[in-house]
Image (cartoon, rainbow, N blue to C red):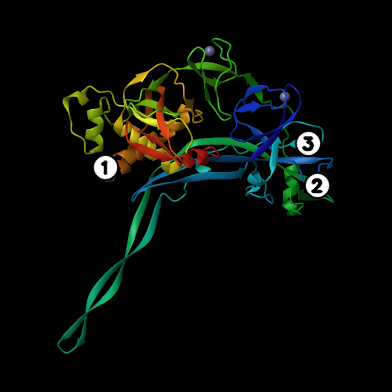
Amino acid sequence: MHIEHECPQCGAPVTLDETDTLFSCSFCKTRLFMQAPDYFRYRIPPRDPFLETVFYVPYWRFKGMHFLCKTSAIENGLVDKTFIAIEAPGLPPSLGIRPQTLKLTFAKLVDGAHYIRPAIAFDRSLAEVQNKVEYQLARTRTSRIVRISEDNYDLVPDVSLEIKEEHTYHEAFVSDTLSLIYAPFYLRDDTVHDGVTGDVLPAAAATVLNTEMIESGWTVSFVPTLCPNCGWDTISGKDSCTVFCRNCCSAWQVTEGKLSPVVFATMRSVIPHGVPSLYLPFWRVSPDITGIKLDSYADFIRFTNIPRALKPALETKPFYLWLPAFKTAPPAFLRIARQLTVNNPEATDTVMPLATVAPVNLPLKDACEGVKTLMGDLTLRKKIFFPTLPDITAGIRDASLVLVPFAENNQELVQLDMNFSLFKNTLRLGQGI
Ligand SMILES: [Zn+2]
Ligand SMILES: [Zn+2]
């Protein structure tokens, strides 16, 4: 989804991606973080820009990574859905693919625009799987004995059918964002028309024009990108939620109109010949999960039953979950988290690395939505653990940001100390989430 906006300094038009957190003007070189008080509000412009009166109908838009812990496996995917935010018979219940195909703007109160107030609060259950139990017909190839004559038998192939029960024990949305999209409608000859397609809507749609309109505006606020500590320009990607200052070696997160400090550390590579070319950020989290004792790495081995020797030193080694602080394709998110959590690396120092640091674009709170799914993925006792998932809660005791070194080849990023790699395009795919 693309958004057109004017530079707050010089007025030049800038096209943003919806995932952008940084506003960067190529004309006056202004760089600012964008913040909305609750969520961003966008507007789809009507096809005819000369319409005198346009009614904007609110639609909730919900997108992110999606995980399902089911009886047979953990399923993953992406969610991108819109839901109408008012009771309005006759209007389309969702926007379909419009947000992806049209250029949007931030919603602004201008003359002739009537914004309808949302009457239905967003509820995650709208996006959740409706059937928590599914029944599937499973076919298994077998054979059976058939009598072909008085004393002669033969073996013939057969298929046996069996009904399998598939439970969804846990559903998680990670890196989910909520926004409100206003879609245009207009009245002509007493009938309501869709402002994008021009289609005539059923007569019932006219009731929407009598609903409550919004009178006061909302603003997108802009926060300077300079380091609050030393005044240098911070290093960030266009979708960063945490930024770094190389000058005074500090990290900052963009929250509620200001930059606030974040604790970070860097993992030192112990491989002498592997020169790291890129550092990927991870949230190292000390989890607090009801009913599971995870005070040490030994506790983790006992809980998951993973094939590791229970050495005495592991009884005092602290246990952490490692969650990517960058967006990736959903299968890679779990795989990378699993690699680091099982390896549980140490060797950290507080120096900012010289090599490039990939943007931190997955906030801690969002990454932690995946804690229960990750524990489910890590444990080998899935049959016992999954049915308990609805009753357990997962919180965090403390967390820090750790930069992990990776070497690079044509297609992959390779972590030499832990001996695993990931395809570069999983990071590119993640940028759109
Ligand atoms: Zn500008
Ligand atoms: Zn600084």
Which of the 4 quarters of the picture holds residue 306? top left
Nearer to us in this view, 136 or 340:
340
Q: Position of residue 212 (x, y in %)?
A: 72, 36
Q: Nearer the viewer, mark 3 or mark 1?
A: 1
Label 3 to label 1, Cα distance in Å? 57 Å
Mark 2 / mark 3, whichever is N-terminal: 3
Helix, strand or loop under label 1: loop
User: Which secondary structure lies at badge 2?
Assistant: strand
Look at 38% across and 58% down and name the residue there: 135
**Amino acid type indicated by mark 3:** Ala
Instruction: Tell which tag, 2 or 3, sits nearer the viewer.
Output: 3
Residue 43, quarter of picture: top right
The residue tagged 1 is: 380
Front tag of 1 and 2 = 1
Q: Amino acid at mark 1?
A: Leu
- Can residue 150 be seen at all in this image of the molecule? yes
Q: What residue would you read off at disc 3?
A: 113
The mark nearer the N terminus, 1 or 2, is: 2
Q: Position of residue 133 (x, y in %)?
A: 39, 52
Q: Which residue is mark 2?
A: 187
